[in-house]
Image: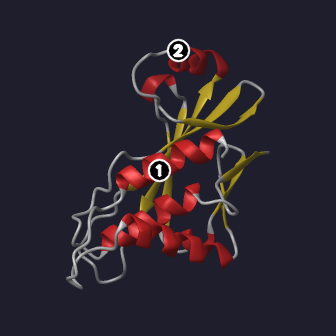
Amino acid sequence: MRPLTALVLSLALAACSGNVSDSASQPPSADQSLAAAAAGKTLPPEQYVSPTAGFDLTLPGVWTGRYRTEEKRDTTAGARLGVVFSFVPDSGSAAPSLTLMTLRIFTKSAWATVATRTSSPVGTVLAERGDDVFVLSLPNVNPYPPASPEAPLYDQLIISIAQGGQQVHLTPR
């Protein structure tokens, strides 16, 4: 298993909503979320084109219509730009739109400093271009209540990143 896949899968499983009882109102288990994400691999991939940072990001097809982005100055851990991908709940839902993942762009020197930290990693390097390092950060937990309708959909998107086949792929321009 590739290092990015292993890291993302472990984070995705940790973020899953939790256990399932026989009650229909309970969210799906991690296994059910994995199966749903695997089934989503048959969908055409989703393409995000950065309007300002000069990169294209290929996402699994299950992401189509399920996220929105905001590109902004982001100095977290020395980054220079961040692209926040937020979950879009079903229409009619009163649930807030919460962060799915953040892609940060660091200079090589800033990333070298961050990468030597002994604390938890800021993210995983997806690509480099010149002096830019593109780093993907995922949440540690699903922020939606386990019994909410949003929780299993959120899980499916996070888990789909780690599944083989259609993974996140960044192409600098």
173 or 29: nearer the viewer: 29
Give the residue at x 55% y 63%.
160
Q: Are marks 1 and 2 in contact (CB under 8 Å)?
A: no
In the displayed structure image, the side of residue 123 where residue 141 appears, left or right: left
Q: Is residue 68 visible?
A: no
Give the residue at x 49% y 60%.
159
How far apart, in angstroms, are the residues tagged by discs 1 and 2? 22 Å
Give the residue at x 27% y 79%.
93
Q: Against 50, is 88 above or below?
A: below
- Nearest to viewer (mark 1 / mark 2): 2
Q: Against 46, is 75 above or below?
A: above
Quadrant of the snapshot with the C terminus: top right
When asked about the image quadrant of residue 26, the answer is bottom left
Disc 1 marks which amino acid?
Met
In the displayed structure image, the side of residue 139 where residue 161 appears, left or right: right
Mark 1 nearby-residue class (10 Å; few <14, some 14–19, many ≥20): some
Secondary structure of the residue carrying numbered label 1 = strand
Residue tagged 2: 116
Q: Against 19, is 140 above or below?
A: above
Give the residue at x 51% y 40%.
82
Secondary structure of the residue carrying numbered label 2 = loop
Q: Against 75, is 160 above or below?
A: below
| Residue 103 image point, x, y percent | 54, 43
Judging from the image, the colouring scheme is: secondary structure
| Residue 45 image point, x, y percent | 68, 69
Q: Is residue 39 visible?
A: yes
Residue tagged 1: 101
Q: First in sequence: mark 1 or mark 2?
A: 1
Mark 2 nearby-residue class (10 Å; few <14, some 14–19, many ≥20): few
54 or 26: nearer the viewer: 26
| Residue 83 image point, x, y percent | 52, 46
Disc 2 marks which amino acid?
Thr
